[in-house]
Amino acid sequence: MRAPTVAVRVRLPQARWALLMVPALGGGLVGLGMAAGLWPETFLVGRFQASLAVLAPAGGLFLSALGLGLQTWRTRTGRQVDQRLQAERAAQAAARQRFLRRLSHEFRNPLTAARAGLANLEAAPLDADARRSLVTVRQQVERLARLVDSLRQLADLETATLALERVDPTAVVAEAVAAVRALPAYAARSVTVQVQKLPWPPGPVLADRDLVALALFNLLDNALKFSPPDRPVEVRLREEMGAVVFEVADAGCGIAPADLPHVTEELYRGQGTASHEGSGLGLALVERVARRHRGTLLIRSRPGQGTVATLRLPLEAG
């Protein structure tokens, strides 16, 4: 009975195949040279007679083995470097999360005490000057409270489990616009929404609805905050190359080129923003939301003309 034939296919990287051909090429060249009489078949090495036809392939094998060893070492070293860099980035991210959580926790108790004290003062009889001062203090305390909430959200975003569901992008845009219009500061502002209708409306995304709404709210808040009250803000929604694209555009002061690469960093405040209330965490939150959904955030801006923030999220598969 004949033994079954077993076919074995060896897969090696292209560079390794090239190295393994060195002995064959060396032997072939030596054979051609000897056939043409370009060099002798044997020669003396000290008192020993050596065959060139044997030494040439042997030398080729040595060079191939050396090359394969060097390539294996480089591949292994590169993999180790990549793993070390990934571990360092993960450690830095974990340290940043711990810091943000600790900062949020340390602020929470003093804020609770400050709010309670303010409530007692607001209930007491005060003259007009004291009442105005109290209003200013209340505004700053609430501003600090929003900063603490943003810090907590930012820390939780890296590790929180996403509540994924099928999200209609048109509906979530309407939700974010309604939320920002509910703020007294923006109640009279103009926000226009342009949704692609032809040849079809944007398809659904598999996402955490609350986080996407939060990201769009932050983009709208930024656009309204840094643009004149008489200028509209545009929200554009379309489908493009396997993704849903949310754009928020304003005709505001714009972002300086030196600040643009840093606007998604935590607590970063660019040039000319000191007169505007803000935590420096809004775009950092949006960037984290995009990353958790395998999407992207792109900010384009021209000083004195305005800014366009583009959030891309992948369409639901299938």
Image: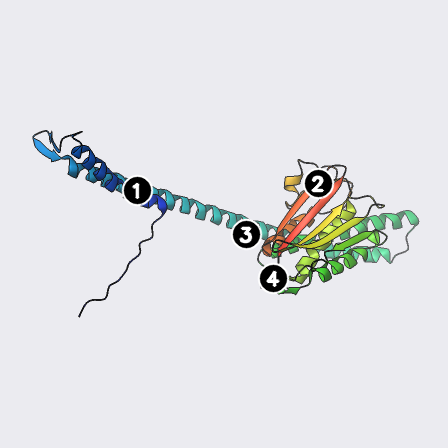
Mark 4: secondary structure: loop
Counting residues from the N terminus, which is met first, the one under dot 3 or under dot 1? Answer: 1
Counting residues from the N terminus, which is met first, the one under dot 1 or under dot 2? Answer: 1
Q: Nearer the viewer, mark 2 or mark 4?
A: 4
Which label number is shown at residue 94?
Answer: 3
Quadrant of residue 123 within the rendered picture:
bottom right
- How far from the left and from the top, in percent, is residue 271? 72, 37
Counting residues from the N terminus, which is met first, the one under dot 3 or under dot 2? Answer: 3
Q: Looking at this rendering, what residue extends furthest in the right direction?
A: 127
Which label number is shown at residue 316?
Answer: 4
Counting residues from the N terminus, which is met first, the one under dot 3 or under dot 4? Answer: 3
Q: Nearer the viewer, mark 1 or mark 2?
A: 1
| In contact (CB < 8 Å): disc 3 and disc 1 | no
Name the residue type under label 2.
Answer: Ser
Q: Nearer the viewer, residue 236 or 82?
A: 236
- 11 up-or-down from 74: above or below: below
Quadrant of residue 213 within the rendered picture:
bottom right
Q: Gap in Å between the C-alphas at discs 3 and 2?
A: 32 Å
Mark 2: secondary structure: strand
Name the residue type under label 3.
Answer: Ala
- How far from the left and from the top, in percent, is residue 276? 77, 43
Query: Which residue shows up at 70% across the image and 40% down it?
Result: 301
Query: Which residue shows up at 63% across the image and 40% down it?
Result: 261
Name the residue type under label 1.
Answer: Leu
> Pointer 4: residues within 10 angstroms few (<14), some, or many (20+)?
some
| In contact (CB < 8 Å): disc 2 and disc 4 | no
Name the residue type under label 4.
Answer: Glu
